[in-house]
Image (cartoon, rainbow, N blue to C red):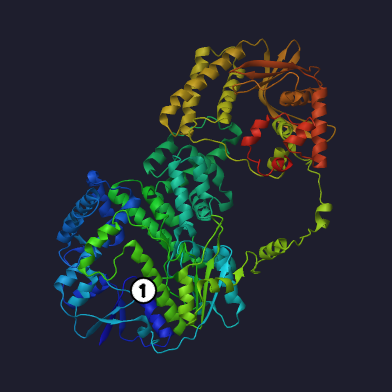
Amino acid sequence: MEKIVVVSGVNETGLLRTMSWHGHDSFGTRVMDAAQLAQYALVRSGKMLREKPVDMQARRLLMLRVLESLPGTGFSSDYSDVGKLLDALDRLRTLVPSDEAGELRSRLAKGEFTDKNSGLIKVYDAYMKLCAEEGVMDRISVIRYAAENCGPLENCQLMTLKERPLTPLEARLTAALGGSGETSLTELYGARTLPRKAEVSAFRAYGASNEALHVIEKILSEKDFTFDSCIVAAADTKLTPAIFLELGQRFGINMTFGCGVPISCTTAADMLVRLRDWAASGYGASALSELVNSRAFNTSKLRKLIAKSCGIKADEVKLKQALSIAGKLRLGCGPDVNRERMDNCDDPLVEDDKRKEYDNAFAQARVIAEELGKGMVYLLRKYCVRRGEYSSLDGGAVNRAASEMSAYSAVTGNPPEDVIPELLTRNVGHSLPRHDALHITSAEQAVFSLRDRLFVTGLSAANFPGTPAEDPLTLDSDLKLFEDLGAAELPVSDRIVIRRKRQAAELAEAASRLCREITLSYSYFDSAELKRANMSTALHEMYTAASGGSETYEELLEEMPSVSYFEDGMTADRLIGRGYCRNHICKPDEKHWENSETDCFDREKEYSPSAVGGFFECPKKYFLQRVLGIPDEDSSSDFKVTEANEFGLMLHELMNMLAVSRRSMSRDRFEKKASEMFDRFLTSKVPLIADMAAPAKREFMTVAMNTYDMDTALGTAIIEAEQEYSAEHVGGLKLKGRLDRLEEAGGSFVIGDFKSGRRIKQKDEDVHTWLQTMLYAYMVDSTCAEKGDPRRTSRCEYRYPRAGIVSKDYDETIPERIITEFTEHLVRGDFPCYDDAAAAGIAVKNEDECLYCSYKGMCGKEEQS
């Protein structure tokens, strides 16, 4: 005769394996929940459902449609709230053995909050009506249909577990199928007559991560311990699995997770967050670059695709430039929009000598445009990284997220990123115990997967049994209205605590007879909230139940060993930390750095005037950025139509055009050229808010025309514009830069440097503010001297179209002094931060700018102050 154990939330394979593990015959035994039993009974009875059964994902979408069609119910139609509403209705429906609709209406009408309950009934009626219209049936309806239409099963014994009582609806189904006997887990495992044999111990640890690490170290330190002979029962199924997963990856330990792990532990979560941020930024360049270059994105796969499509080698792919083009065009998930923007793109800021390189990057950007246009679900499935041993975990998270995003978008027509916040709250990767892996599961489910050694972690008072709050949708007072319908265990808040403590005692009782060792633990200090935590009374009850002892709570707490933060010695950092806490000194090896080279002067490098100027603004920033190569943070804004450098480049391009034909170019023609240039710029950089383009263009045109008026009013003759100059100082420093204007007045040169800023920064008494033009003058004079040209520079000018012109007579001693000082600091490797540099008369930078500097956390200024 076939024996079926009816129990909810238990995997059949896992329970039968545990029975076999402990030597009990599981042949002829099956394990089913009520929905599986209903499907089985329908098949055995020759009944066929006319409606199609639907899973939870499809039910969420149905409920979403209901809420959108019933705006007056008072319930949120956000996707994240849909699951909570379905759980509330399911909770009520399983309490009703028959006449579901009638019982719900009559009993909820007597509830304390009539408006809420009236809304629940409206939603319930609309949901059931929509299911009928769509020809579908959810799991509860399937159970009810089987209970009403199936008779007793022949040659089949139905058994329920005393530890897991059924709901009234589930009890009606088992009664309809032939009644049920009752058994217990100890009987299933054949442990009823076994004596207590387990050695019971307990400890407390400083922080949850230290608690988990101590469990791992204990398993590794015992010779007869193997990971597949151990199981960890976690009271906290959000934090603990995440910590063990991180430890498993760190030390190469195979693990399985019966309770799953938070999706935030997978690469899918990282990519989902970046996809959401990319969409929220309006598909901007910075967010796209962060997405493609993240650890979750398979960048090499994209490189190979680009190389194959463009007929080049993978190392020839200019991914950074291609992403910049795609980001500026705000290429998103619309293929038609992407193609149109690529076809219309005409960047006016591309220099002639870099046109070929830009065209190659543009062709690669077309491939990226095609990939992005296939949508977020496609990107997630194709490019999300699956990590080695945990590829199944990452892959499962990807499949679950992708299918839900796709279904949501198909049903609602809304963008798939709307469901990402809800997806990030889920647990994924639920798996069965494996012979070569440590198994992590919840404290409630551990009794179904017992092994030789049991570790129960997280038994602080806050975690277990906790303080469950009332569900605002189904209050305790609402649930108690159904108490007379035969519920063995109503899911009200106070009884949830009782149930958890009872299940903990049942776990301890079964483990004491089946396991060889039991270790109970809790974290006595919450390292996240920086506060102490109390031991749960459940830990004391489990300890005494498993050991048969009579220790009081206080006695157990006093005897329990405490694991300090650095006590475990599995890693070098723990040993260093332990020594530090004991006032031991970790003496560094001074030999290497005492003989290290300090000279930072690259004698083959050509330094630009702007680079030299950067040193005199802040030497430490120059060192971090230009010597060590630490990139500056991207200060661009998605809301700006033009960045300051783009604004300046367009003005420089216009001034270059004006320099070629200053006399022949009329004001109207110049205005037309400026307008065309800005329009071309907008084809290469699409603004996030289209309405901001017009005021940005007006501002640009105003500055451009001011520049025209300023330039044409000058009485100087243009010698060269945008011309490169170079020179080598006697000290070995090589200079090179592109000068905006070289002009002549009265037989001598005038250096002109255009600035698009709103205020004049140069001060006549501060030579450092004139540094760039002085260095350009030095290069011009050096070049003229080499060519035998007797002309020299007499004046340096900064020209601000918004603020006016400032000039200063050229003093050849100034660049000599600046170059010498700069070179000496490079040779000595001397790069003081702002305060020391200011005291030495080096820095001219406004100290307020330190507040917004990308390097302020590493420059050392805070430590000195």
Quadrant holding the N terminus = bottom left
Please state the horizontal and vertical placement of residue 209, each as a whole percent of the image.
56, 63
Quadrant holding the C terminus = top right
| Res 862 seen here | yes
Q: In front: 540, or 325?
A: 540
Asked if residue 841 is positioned above or below residue 402 in the image, the reply reads: above
Please state the horizontal and vertical placement of residue 289, each as a whole percent of the image.
52, 45
Q: Residue at x 25, y 62 (%)?
A: 480
| The quadrant where residue 747 appears | top right
Q: In front: 268, or 428?
A: 428
- Label 1 sits on a secondary structure element that is loop
Is residue 184 found left or right of 662 in the rendered image? Answer: left
Q: Residue at x 62, y 10 (%)?
A: 713
Q: Residue at x 48, y 40 (%)?
A: 284
| The quadrant where residue 800 appears | top right
Alpha-carbon neighbours of circle 1 within 10 Å: few (<14), some, or many (≥20)?
some
Is residue 362 found left or right of 597 in the rendered image? Answer: left
| Res 595 seen here | no
Asked if residue 862 is positioned above or below residue 749 in the image, the reply reads: below
| Mark 1, residue position | 11
Q: In front: 8, or 471?
A: 471
Query: Identity of the amino acid at label 1?
Result: Asn
